[in-house]
Amino acid sequence: MSAPPLPEVFGNYALGDFAEVAAPADISWLPQTAGWTWLGVLLLGFALNRCWRWLKHCRHNRYRREAIARLGNLSPETLGKQLVTEVNKLLKLAAMAAYSRERVASLYGEEWAGFLNRQCESAPFSPQQAAMLATGAYNPASLDTASAIALLEASVAWVREHRETTDG
């Protein structure tokens, strides 16, 4: 059995001469006036400038992040008498990265401890800690855990807070 044949005209006879409505053209996302183009260029330039300054800042302060990480890896229990020597080494490396080698490399003793304290608005090292830094490499002494932790915290504070432009 087969279906009967369909008529030539099928559906609504009133719509026989109906033409479909054409869809409008897509709306362009490009700006239509020069003002919007200039504003876009200015905003893009501003964003690129901020990104460049942020990258420059991150690259410039890389030595701070590395010094803080290395200070965090120091353990008073495992280093014992060598803790002050290791802290002095890390502080000297950070200071040479921030200031000129000629200015920092020759500092030692009380002059070194004074230099460190002068580079911050408030001195991070107490007089006892400054004395430890001044003489610790030459006269290593065992520190109790509280003094060692306080020295490490003061060293991290110095790395974070020192100013690079002051003369000392």
Image (cartoon, rainbow, N blue to C red):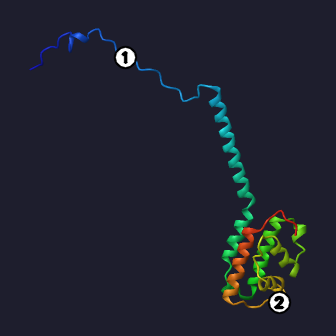
Quadrant assignment, res 125: bottom right
* Residue type indicated by callout 2: Asn
- Classify mark 2: residues with Cα within 10 Å, few (<14), some (14-19) or many (20+): few
Per the rendering, the mark at residue 21 is: 1
* Residue type indicated by callout 1: Val
**Disc 2 to disc 1, C-alpha distance:** 95 Å
Q: Residue 50: x and y, percent?
A: 69, 48
Nearest the eye: 12 or 164: 164
Quadrant assignment, res 3: top left
Q: Residue 26: x and y, percent?
A: 48, 25
Q: Residue 153: x and y, percent?
A: 69, 77
The residue tagged 2 is: 139
Q: Secondary structure at mark 1?
A: loop
Q: Residue 23: x and y, percent?
A: 41, 20
Give whichever of discs 2 and 1 has the lower sequence position: 1
Q: Is residue 27 left or right of residue 6?
A: right
